[in-house]
Amino acid sequence: KENSLYNHGSNGHSKKSIPAVNLAKDKDNFYIEVDAPGLKKETFNINLVKNKLTVSVDKTEDKTNKKFTRIEFGFDSFSRTFTLPAVADFKNIEASYLDGILNICIAKKEEAKENLERKIEIK
């Protein structure tokens, strides 16, 4: 069987339905990294409802005139929701998109940053 540009199997490839994420934290912040190459920052929606942070993309309306015969990268649409901990500062969240990675930084509340360790004097 001929393997042409327009007639071939999946070769083990499948369209991604949701992007991979990395979650991290340090003493001051929580970090969410979303692996979403090929998008524009305007494509993302980031919403916070109570302690739920939702990252979504909806590209169901493609504005190009191309008729794709095969698509192996990118996303049509997705939604990921993250439950933020109580020590997150919901008013101090920043996001940037660089080199195909959406980076979200959520600051911790000041009381969570303080070192609560201390010596107790015995009287």
Image (tube, rainbow, N blue to C red):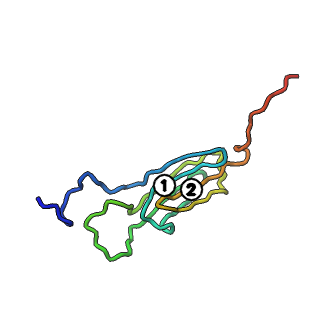
Q: Residue at x 16, y 61 (%)?
A: 3
Q: Residues within 10 Å of mark 2 (few under 14, many from 20)?
A: many
2 shown above or below 63:
above
Q: Residue at x 78, y 32 (%)?
A: 118
- Which percent across, then down, holds residue 122? 85, 23
84 shown above or below 67:
above
In the picture, the quarter occupied by the N terminus is bottom left
Type of the residue with mark 1: Val
The residue to which callout 2 is attached is 104
Residue closest to the eye, 1 or 80 = 1
Residue occupying the far top of the picture: 123
- Which percent across, then down, holds residue 60? 38, 67
Residue occupying the far right of the picture: 123
> Quick check: 30 left or right of 64?
right
* C-alpha span from label 2 to label 1: 8 Å
Q: Residue at x 56, y 61 (%)?
A: 96
The answer to the question of whether label 2 and label 1 lie on touching residues, with beta carbons closer than 8 A, is yes
> Quick check: 121 left or right of 54?
right
In the picture, the quarter occupied by the C terminus is top right
Mark nearer the N terminus (2 vs 1) = 1
- Which percent across, then down, holds residue 72? 32, 60
Query: In the image, which disc is placed on residue 34?
Result: 1
Residue occupying the far front of the picture: 99
Q: Secondary structure at mark 1?
A: strand
Q: Residues within 10 Å of mark 1 (few under 14, many from 20)?
A: many
Residue closest to the eye, 122 or 99 = 99
Instruction: Give the image quarter of residue 68.
Output: bottom left
- Which percent across, then down, holds residue 88? 64, 49
Number of marks in the rendered image:
2
